[in-house]
Image: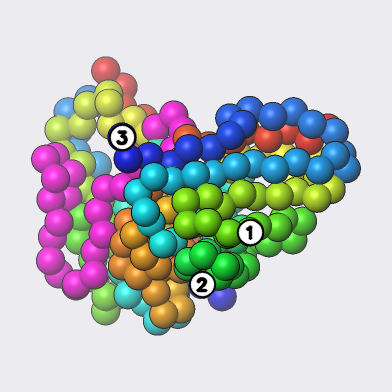
Amino acid sequence: EAQVTQNPRYLITVTGKKLTVTCSQNMNHEYMSWYRQDPGLGLRQIYYSMNVEVTDKGDVPEGYKVSRKEKRNFPLILESPSPNQTSLYFCASSLSGYYNEQFFGPGTRLTVL
Amino acid sequence: EDKVVQSPLSLVVHEGDTVTLNCSYEVTNFRSLLWYKQEKKAPTFLFMLTSSGIEKKSGRLSSILDKKELFSILNITATQTGDSAIYLCAAPSNFGNEKLTFGTGTRLTIIP
């Protein structure tokens, strides 16, 4: 089944403890992206990747890192999480970065205490 | 700064009613506008509009784009309780889809 998977789906952690949220797609998509969704602010793009080893900042990249070493995986790293990073995170992918619909993963609910 | 604005923020109607959701945009190098439906979790794709004046239709849902006035509408006829969701519109900016700006969404509630 074609899908985008994220792990973990739920995470409660403490300030400063490094964490990684994994994202994987099995559709051979070139483009992948991370978003966070907060009440009243909608979906905001954190980082995106047009292809392997090509990443760029979205609108809210501060406090996050990404890497794209393989086409299928695009992990999101929080080196030192803070409470303002408590949010619902979505990974998405599309065939390419141009004119294509994005398929979203199921979301990761992160709480930083 | 790229901007996508949706209205209304929230809408409550009775089953069977017809609703119109609005999306206006100001983005650099506009190419397309996308509509998504978000129920419990992940947004799911509804439409992508690239040409002005051409309606896209899927069952009871339809959408149209006006590139001159910089807006799009999403219509849902004969609404059902399963249409209750947040409807999001988004517009890619720059030179492709790489940077996607979303509106804050319209929360639609259908009362049986």
Residue appearing at x 27%, y 75% in the figure: B67
- Helix, strand or loop for disc 3: loop
Residue B3 visible in the current orientation: no
10 Å neighbourhood of mark 3: few (<14), some, or many (≥20)? few
Spatial CA distance of label 3 from label 1 is 25 Å
Q: Which residue is mark 2?
A: B2
Which residue is at 17% across, 50% downward? B62
Question: What amino acid is found at the position of numbered circle 1 in the picture?
Answer: Ser
Instruction: Find residue B29 and report its image quarter.
Output: bottom left
Residue type at numbered disc 2? Asp
Q: Is B84 placed above or below B35 here?
A: above
As displayed, is residue A38 above or below residue A62? above
Expressed as whole percent of the image width and height from the top left, the position of residue B43 reads 40, 42
Q: Tell me which label, 3 or 1, sits earlier in the chain.
A: 3
Of marks 2 and 1, the one in the foreground: 1
- Where disc 1 sits, the SS reads loop
Crowd class of label 1 (few under 14; some 14 to 19; many from 20; radius 10 Å): some
B81 or A27: which is nearer to us? A27
Which numbered circle lies on residue B105?
Answer: none
The location of residue A60, given as percent across then percent down, is 66, 61
Marks 3 & 1, CB-CB < 8 Å contact: no
Left or right: residue A35 versus residue A16 is left
Quadrant of the rendered structure where residue B39 is? top left
**Outermost front residue:** A70
Magenta region: which residues? B39-62
* Residue A67: mark in rendering: 1
Disc 2/disc 1 C-alpha distance (Å): 26 Å
* Residue B61 highlighted magenta (yes or no): yes
Q: Residue at x 51, y 72 (%)?
A: B2
- Tell me if A43 is positioned left or right of B68 in this view: right
Q: Residue drawn 72% across and 55% down?
A: A64
